[in-house]
Image (tube, coloured by chain):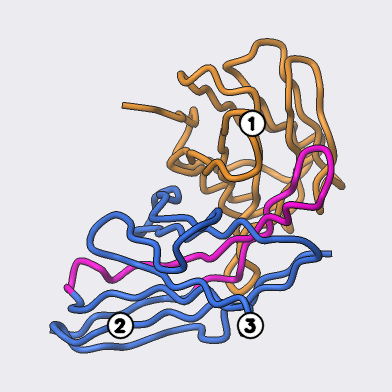
Chain colours: A orange, B blue
Amino acid sequence: DVKVTQSSRYLVKRTGEKVFLECVQDMDHENMFWYRQDPGLGLRLIYFSYDVKMKEKGDIPEGYSVSREKKERFSLILESASTNQTSMYLCASSPATGGGTEAFFGQGTRLTVV
Amino acid sequence: AQSVAQPEDQVNVAEGNPLTVKCTYSVSGNPYLFWYVQYPNRGLQFLLKYITGDNLVKGSYGFEAEFNKSQTSFHLKKPSALVSDSALYFCAVRDSLSGGYQKVTFGTGTKLQVIP
């Protein structure tokens, strides 16, 4: 069974902290994504990666960075957490085989910044 | 630019009745269309997709969706709703003409409530 695993289900961090969200996939997928989900706004793409050490900005990259040192792992970094980054964060992966391939999602990390 | 709209924040339906969750899209080329479902405090699960071919697409858990090119719609349907279908449903689109990565755009989601 294919799997995308996010390291934490719930996180509470303080304003100004550096926060790491980790995601691992076991499907040998080339593409990996980080989304943010907020009520009424749907899913918004933060960053994605199409290969090891490669990254592209999504729609809302401000305040975030990413790291992909190995194919199976994609990390989202909040350099200095702020309360407006309180949200549900979803990691996803997909193969590079054409545009009609669905994504596989992790279970989500609900981050609260206080 | 591509976009997708889910005009209803919430849909209520009685158990056993047919359900429809609406989705319309806008793309420059041909669309790749997807439906995902999200149960409380979980990630998204893929339900079905339209790439090409038959306009009626069948997916998981008895769901189906009809692609209508003239109305630029991809509504999700099920003949008989179950209480367990209550969840948040997302429509998503990818433009076949967008180069490179081919970004996916998600709708804002529709909460389906099936009433016993």
Question: Which-is-in-front pick, marks 1 and 3?
Answer: 3
Element type at mark 3:
loop
Question: Which-is-in-front pick, marks 2 and 1?
Answer: 2
Question: Which-is-in-front pick, marks 3 and 2?
Answer: 3
Asked if the magenta segment contains residue A79, the reply would be: no
Q: Which mark is residue B70?
A: 3
Measured as percent of width and height from the top left, residue A100 is found at: 58, 45
Disc 3: host chain: B
Which quarter of the rendered picture does the C terminus of chain B lie within? bottom left
Badge 2: how crowded within 10 Å, few (<14), some, or many (20+)?
many
Where B92 sits versus B12, above or below?
above
Where A2 sits versus B66, above or below?
above
Q: Amino acid at mark 3?
A: Ser
Badge 1: how crowded within 10 Å, few (<14), some, or many (20+)?
many
Residue carrying label 1? A32
Residue carrying label 2? B19
Residue B108 sits in quarter: bottom right
Are the numbered discs 1 and 3 placed on the same chain, yes or no? no
For the point 76% across and 50% down, the residue is A82
Seen in the image, is A113 located left or right of residue B114? right
